[in-house]
Amino acid sequence: MKTLVRVVSILATTFFTLALLGLVAGCASVMPTPPTAVHQPMTARPADAPRALAANGAIYRPGAARGLFEDRRANRVGDIITVNLVERTSAQKSANASAGRASSLTGGVKASSKLPLSGLAGLSAEAGVESDFSGKGAAAASNVFSGAITVTVIDALANGNLLVSGEKMLAINQGNEFIRFSGVINADNISASNTVQSTQVADARIEYRGSGFIDESNVMGWLHRFFVAINPF
């Protein structure tokens, strides 16, 4: 009876271990899309085109009319704009401080026949306090982001500005790289080729993220983070 119970226990443990390993392997094989902070949605469909009117032989057709001096610059929801990423930021900060303080005290008893405690003649006392403090700190940061991404107009504001958002995904070997961009563009800054510099975009949000085992290997495990969080030293 004990042997049977032991065999059943071993089989149950083996089955549980295999199931756990399969679950871990399944989770590891999935490459979830990393979260984003850019404006949503990332794309928008343009409004449905008006139904074309039947040809009546006239030169002017309301369904296909276009201004004589109108260019192809983006100005409506669903239009696309190419953003040239030319971000370059640099910041430096340094600080130092020092302080010092010192004090001393000296006292004594001189020989005198008028003192009843003549044995204290020549006794002296001296005390002193001294403190020093110095501190220094420095910080520096530099970031460079260059490239291009084509985004979609997701909203046309009342003052003519355009809210854009878009994403570019690159599949490299066994990982995915995501480039995301969103912001508000002044329509006057859009060139004739429908391009704009990222430095001319207001409320710009630029992301470069990745997914895959290479990126996961650079992240501290949850168990390690747990022990780091509770470690007081």
Image: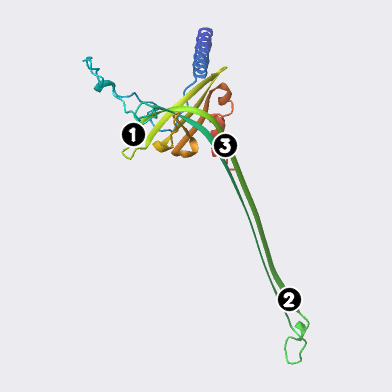
Give how far across and how far down residue 58 sits, in percent. Answer: 23, 18
Residue behind mark 1: 156
Give the image quarter of residue 145.
top right
Among the two numbered marks 2 and 1 on one chain, the one whose residue lies closer to the N terminus: 2
Q: CA distance from mark 2 to mark 1?
A: 84 Å
Residue 186 in sight in this render:
no
In depth, the one of 25 and 74 nearer the eye is 74
Residue behind mark 3: 228
Q: CA distance from mark 1 to mark 3?
A: 48 Å
- SS of the residue under disc 3: helix
- Whether label 1 touches label 3, CB < 8 Å: no
What amino acid is found at the position of numbered circle 1 in the picture? Answer: Ala
Which residue is drawn at the image coordinates 72% and 88% (left, top)?
Answer: 116
30 vs 91, left or right, is left
Residue behind mark 2: 125
- Indicate whether 29 appears above or below 215: above
Q: Residues within 10 Å of mark 2 (few under 14, many from 20)?
A: few
160 vs 7, left or right, is left
Residue 107 in sight in this render:
yes
- SS of the residue under disc 1: strand
